[in-house]
Amino acid sequence: MADEKDRLGNKLKDKRKAEEDRFFAERDKALLEKLRQQNLTADEEKVRTLALMRCPKCGEELATVELHGVSVDECPGGHGMWLDAGELELLAGRERDSWLGRFFFRPKLKP
């Protein structure tokens, strides 16, 4: 009978130890995931700052150019021009007779 109690006590100790191990394993896993996310965020921010105002084709730094009163970003290597939000509509508003103006100011179809 005493042997039976010892085995039950040992099983309870083993169960507590297993629960404790599982708790710490889950906590460690959560902490590692948090560190990974912080590293990813830092890496993404680093890439974002390196790519800011750079041509996606050649990597040259974009030059700001004035075009019809609107500042546009242009690749010095001739790979393209980039407009900020609203600048395309502003240019299209000045050129209503061009294809661009007709595209933005065409009558809207009703659904």
Image (tube, rainbow, N blue to C red):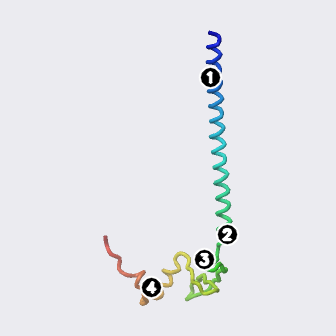
Which residue occupies the foreground of this view, 47 or 63? 47
Look at the picture and state if 98 lies above or below 16: below
Residue receiving disc 2? 49
Residue receiving disc 4? 100
Q: Nearer the viewer, mark 1 or mark 3?
A: 1
Residue 72 location, quadrant: bottom right
Q: Which residue appears at 40% of the width and 85% of the height?
A: 102
Q: Position of residue 43 (x, y in %)?
A: 67, 62
Which type of secondary structure does the marked residue at label 2 adopt?
Answer: helix
Measured Cα–Cα span from mark 1 to mark 3: 63 Å
Q: Which residue appears at 66% of the width and 55% of the height?
A: 38
Which type of secondary structure does the marked residue at label 1 adopt?
Answer: helix
Q: Position of residue 46 (x, y in %)?
A: 68, 65
Query: Of the residues under marks 1 and 3, which one precedes in the sequence?
Result: 1
Q: Nearer the viewer, mark 2 or mark 4?
A: 2
Amino acid on which disc 1 is placed: Lys
Q: Nearer the viewer, mark 1 or mark 4?
A: 1
Residue receiving disc 3? 56
Look at the picture and state if 7 lies above or below 25: above
Residue 83 location, quadrant: bottom right
Q: Position of residue 37 (x, y in %)?
A: 64, 54
Which type of secondary structure does the marked residue at label 3 adopt?
Answer: loop
Query: Of the residues under marks 1 and 4, which one precedes in the sequence?
Result: 1
Query: Of the residues under marks 2 and 3, which one precedes in the sequence?
Result: 2
**Mark 1 and mark 3 residues within 8 Å of each other at the beta carbon:** no
Q: Position of residue 15 (x, y in %)?
A: 62, 27
Residue receiving disc 1? 11
Q: Residues within 10 Å of mark 2 (few under 14, many from 20)?
A: few
**How many numbered discs, if any?**
4
